[in-house]
Amino acid sequence: MPTDLDLCRHVHALVADLAAEHGEVDLVGRRVGCAPDARDALVETFDAFGVVGGAGVRVRDREGRVLLVRYEGADGWIDPGGSRRPGESYRECARRAVRETTGVETTVGDLAQVHLLYMDDWTDREPVPNPYVSYEGQVNDTGTGTGEEGSEGGSGADGRDGVTGPAANVAEVRWTDIIPEDLLYEELAELALGT
């Protein structure tokens, strides 16, 4: 029987491990409204597979631009990432998710932030944490996704600037040297862009 307490302990241990490894963790917490079934699925997945959360990378190219994605049905731009799979570390998840989401190969670097998204349904139950680990990263030296054109929007004519093979749930992918106004979460506005 899955328990909320087991999930909370696991997430607290994750944050402690990241703090021990990186020395300091920029921890961002916020509540996310969800249906009761979505909250239950999170706890049940953790109980069945020992996996929770996801990871992504704030990918930069040689010009200092940042790779952002807009998912189908989302209200704004976000750094590319995805959900963890069984047996996968957060770092491995981040690298795979960026490749699958955007087609860009990246080198995963330092920890950027840890987001604790507290899944909060309309019942009287306590919200449960769903961690998202965000890393800094660079495009691999293969040249994939670096693009040559710089513009106000930071992307080529097709809006993707050398990015190949985005996932089906991705509406748009682009490199940018200007922070868009419509970000999915405000912490992305703190990115220092350019060289």
Image: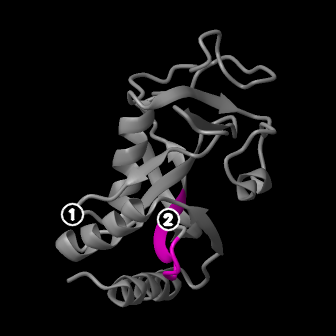
Is residue 18 one of those drawn in magenta?
Answer: no
Asked if one can make out residue 105 in the rendered structure from this viewpoint, the answer is no
- Judged left or right of residue 64, residue 86 is left
The label shown at residue 12 is: none
The label shown at residue 86 is: 1
Tag 2–tag 1 contact (CB < 8 Å): no
Instruction: Report the front residue among 120 and 53.
Output: 120
Residue at image position (70%, 32%) is: 176
Tell me: residue 144, above or below residue 81.
above
Which picture quadrant has residue 118?
bottom right
**Local secondary structure at mark 1:** loop
Residue at image position (35%, 56%) is: 93
Q: What predominant SS class does the magenta segment belong to?
A: strand
Is residue 132 one of those drawn in magenta?
Answer: yes
Residue named by callout 2: 133
Quarter of the image for the N terminus: give it.
bottom left
Q: Residues within 10 Å of mark 2 (few under 14, many from 20)?
A: many
**Local secondary structure at mark 2:** strand
> Identity of the amino acid at label 1?
Pro
Question: Which residues, given as a range, are shown in magenta?
Answer: 123-135
- In this picture the colour scheme is one colour
Residue at image position (48%, 53%) is: 56
Which picture quadrant has residue 7?
bottom left
Rounded to the nearest whole Å, what is the CA distance between mark 2 and mark 1? Answer: 16 Å
